Image (cartoon, rainbow, N blue to C red):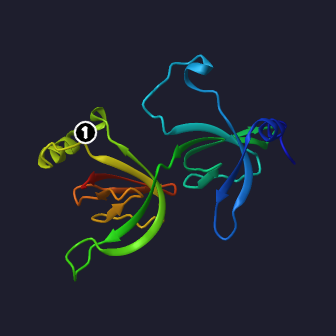
């Protein structure tokens, strides 16, 4: 049975599609009021790729889902189930806008380069790591990299095929590499790793 919040989400919200196999899920979302708009201090004004939205009570959205809203794609990073009277009222989520579509390449023993295509059309977020996020280990890596540029980080679904020492080529032809010094973290359906912009 739909919740009371569902009607508001359908009337004032936007259509969305949760991309799942074997079948996608059609639903609606509405933006959450957060940060300054809600009278609270904005915790991090630099996360312009992050949005907070509510999903319908029957959407079954989970972390790691890829969601299409209009022409944009978003990775679901966090999900909080809001309940009332032992029923789900809505899902409160944090989503990251996927600004890149990449092809994932593995190392080829023949060419001695990252030329073996593993998967193409992988939607992900690639964003620059800010200096304040670097821990001591990352700082050592930066020194080894010669200070040419800050590293980037990638967020993708866990089945993206991104592994240690894989290379990514985005829609603009930019090449990134997951260095062997960086770990690839996978949790709750989400993959995260630091990557180096090569060219």
Report the residue at 17% width, 44% height from top: 148
Q: Secondary structure at mark 1?
A: loop
Query: Which of the 4 quarters of the picture holds residue 13?
Result: top right
From the top left corner, tell me how far across and down residue 70 is, in percent. 65, 48
The answer to which of 193 and 79 lies nearer the viewer is: 193
Q: Residue furthest bottom?
A: 110
Residue 99 left/right relative to 109: right
**Mark 1 burial class by Cα count in 10 Å: few <14, some 14-19, many 20+:** few
Query: Which of the 4 quarters of the picture holds residue 66?
Result: bottom right
Looking at the image, residue 88 lies above or below residue 47: below
From the top left corner, tell me how far across and down residue 2 is, in percent. 85, 45
From the top left corner, tell me how far across and down residue 133 is, in percent. 31, 36
Looking at the image, residue 122 lies above or below residue 31: below
Report the residue at 29% width, 32% height from top: 132
The C terminus sits in image quarter = bottom left
Q: Residue furthest top?
A: 39
Q: Residue furthest right?
A: 1
Residue at label 1?
Answer: 135
The answer to which of 179 and 167 lies nearer the viewer is: 167
Residue 130 left/right relative to 98: left
Picture mark count: 1
Residue 108 left/right relative to 95: left
Report the residue at 34% width, 70% height from top: 105
Residue 16 left/right relative to 148: right
């Amino acid at each position: 049975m739909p919740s009371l919040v569902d009607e508001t989400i359908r009337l004032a919200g936007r259509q969305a599609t949760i991309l799942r196999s074997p079948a996608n899920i059609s639903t609606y979302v509405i933006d959450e009021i957060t940060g300054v708009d809600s009278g609270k201090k904005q915790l991090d004004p630099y996360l312009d790729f992050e949005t907070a939205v509510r999903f319908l009570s029957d959407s079954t959205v989970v972390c790691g889902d890829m969601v299409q809203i209009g022409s944009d794609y978003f990775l679901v990073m966090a999900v909080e189930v809001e309940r009332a009277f032992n029923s789900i009222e809505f899902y409160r989520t944090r989503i990251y806008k996927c600004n890149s579509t990449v092809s994932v390449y593995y190392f080829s023993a023949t060419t001695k380069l990252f030329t073996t295509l593993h998967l193409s059309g992988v939607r992900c977020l690639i964003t620059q790591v800010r200096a304040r996020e670097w821990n001591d280990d990352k700082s050592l890596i930066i020194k080894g990299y010669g200070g040419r540029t800050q590293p980037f980080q990638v967020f993708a679904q866990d089945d993206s095929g991104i592994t240690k020492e894989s290379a990514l080529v985005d829609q603009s032809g930019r090449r990134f590499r997951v260095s062997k010094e960086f770990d690839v973290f996978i949790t709750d359906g989400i993959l995260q790793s630091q990557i180096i912009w090569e060219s």
